Amino acid sequence: MDEIRGLCVLLMIFYHAFYTMSMLFHWELGTKLLVFFSPAEPFFAGLFILISGISSQLSHSNLIRGLKLLGVALALTLVTYFIIPSELIVFGILHMLSVCMIVFGLGQKLWDRIPLILGLAVCAVLFLITMPVSDGYLGLPGTLAWKIPAGWYEFGWLFPLGIHRADFFSADYFPLFPWIFLFFCGTYIGRWARNGKFPDFTYRLRFTSLSWMGRHALILYLIHQPLIFGVCTLISWIISL
């Protein structure tokens, strides 16, 4: 799983590099690459979240991990607020994952009492139903749909749930709905991993570099954007000479 997580981190780095090239430095090449790569971003982000859920079944301290990660996420919010307010991160993937870990850690004994297949199925359905929360409703497009009261979107403090005003902005935004349910899908799948019931090939190490990236995902997440910005700044300076 470290290798898959490492691959997701690598793809994230590429995506943020293209984003920086396009949105901050206004390079045409960056814009073309960003447009090409953007459709894939939710898929590798979702895979990363799913693996994080699986890994939670292999940890003995999800509550502590979640609290530590929340501290890092809040620090990231402060850094972006004071240093690069145009790229303010209000509730990004770290915020979301930290809350997921805390919720799972607080109720792990309860969650583990739910039959695996039932829990996985319910979470998968809830993930699909809550995907359009930001669009103002719950349900599946073209089938059943429940409209969320429009007034809720004016509160201004429900953005962690995906309910936010039209002028809300977060450079990295992963609300709890629907992503918490994908995380919990991972926790149920993780029972198989915890009990050694994954296929044998999933336990073998093949790509040490990707495995290393997977084990150091948090550090790479925190340092990759400043490094990308620095490299782009250097290239821009060289071009201007």
Image: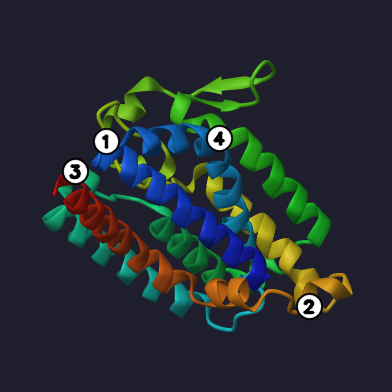
Disc nearer the start of the sequence (2/4)? 4
Disc nearer the start of the sequence (3/1)? 1
Q: Secondary structure at mark 1?
A: loop
Residue found at x 33% / y 38%: 22
Q: Which mark is residue 26?
A: 1
Q: Callout 3 environment at 10 Å: few (<14), some (14 to 19), or many (20+)?
A: few
Pick out the residue farthest to the bottom.
60
Residue found at x 67% / y 15%: 142
Q: Residue 55, position in %: x, y? A: 63, 71
The residue identified by callout 2 is 203
* Amino acid at pointer 4: Pro
CA–CA distance in space, label 3 to label 1: 15 Å
Q: Residue 46, position in %: x, y? A: 59, 50
Disc nearer the start of the sequence (2/1)? 1
* Amino acid at pointer 1: His
Disc nearer the start of the sequence (2/3)? 3
Residues 23 and 100: in front is 23
Q: Secondary structure at mark 4?
A: helix
Pick out the residue farthest to the front.
241
Disc nearer the start of the sequence (3/4)? 4
Q: Secondary structure at mark 2?
A: helix
CA–CA distance in space, label 2 to label 3: 42 Å
Between circles 3 and 1, the one closer to the viewer is 1
Residues 95 and 36: in front is 36
Q: Callout 2 environment at 10 Å: few (<14), some (14 to 19), or many (20+)?
A: few
The residue identified by callout 4 is 39
The residue identified by callout 3 is 86
